[in-house]
Image (tube, rainbow, N blue to C red):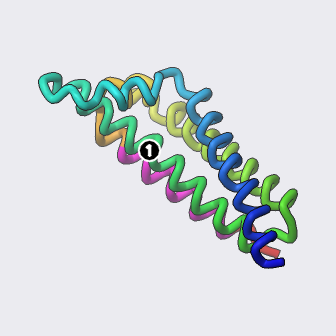
Amino acid sequence: MYLMNFLMYLGVTIPLMIFSLMLFLFTTPYKEFKILADGDDLDNPRKVSSAKAVAFDLGGKVLGTAILLSSAIYHSIGLWDMIIWTLTGTISLIIVYWLFELLTPSLRIRHEIPNGNVAVGFFSFCLSVSTGILMASLISY
């Protein structure tokens, strides 16, 4: 019984994480995995910085989603409840990214991160993790 529940939740959780990651990749105008792959060119500091900024940005979204998902697993009354909470949290993370873009017009996040502004990437990481924590705390009955 417990093993079946574990396997059911695992079978839903992994695709949810992948789906959330795909949504994040779809909503940004730059190609995260290409920038990450190009980041090993140590002769080009700009590519290295771009990869670091993207890694922070995308890593924060993945970590924020994992925090949210762990709370959804713990507090949900069933699989559908967990799925709904996870999708709600993923949409919240995307909204926070675009609010960050909208509220900081002098930064133009969609240009700063792929151009190697590591500080902006790290701040985006912090926003995503914070949003994940806040969304996780809101999931309770």
Q: Is residue 102 above or below residue 141?
A: above
Which residue is at 48% across, 51% downward? 127
Residue placed at 74% from the left, 64% from the top?
A: 7
Q: Which residue lies furthest to the left in this view?
A: 43
Q: Which of 27 and 2 is in front in this view?
A: 2
Q: Give coordinates of residue 55: x percent, y percent.
A: 38, 41
Residue ID at (55%, 55%): 64
Q: What element carries label 1?
A: helix
Q: Position of residue 123 (x, y in %)?
A: 39, 47
> Crowding at label 1, few (<14), some or many (≥20) Cα neighbours within 10 Å?
many
Helix, strand or loop: magenta stretch = helix
Assess whether residue 124 is covered by the magenta stretch: yes
Left or right of 8, for residue 109: left
Q: Which of 5 and 41 is in front in this view?
A: 5
Residue 105 placement (x, y as % from top left): 45, 28
Find disc 1 in the rendering and name its residue: 124
Left or right of residue 5, residue 96 in this image:
left
Q: Which of 106/19 is in front?
A: 19
**Residue 15 coordinates in the image, percent (x, y):** 69, 46
Tell me the kind of residue under disc 1: Ser
State which quarter of the image contains the C terminus: bottom right
Residue positioned 64% across, 60% down in the render: 68
Left or right? Give the position of 85 relative to 107. Answer: right
Q: In which quarter of the view is residue 19 placed?
A: top right
In the rendered image, residue 67 lying in the magenta stretch gets the answer no
Give the magenta-colored segment's residue range.
Answer: 122-137
| Residue at the limit of the structure toward the bottom, as seen here | 2
Q: Is residue 48 above or below residue 88?
A: above
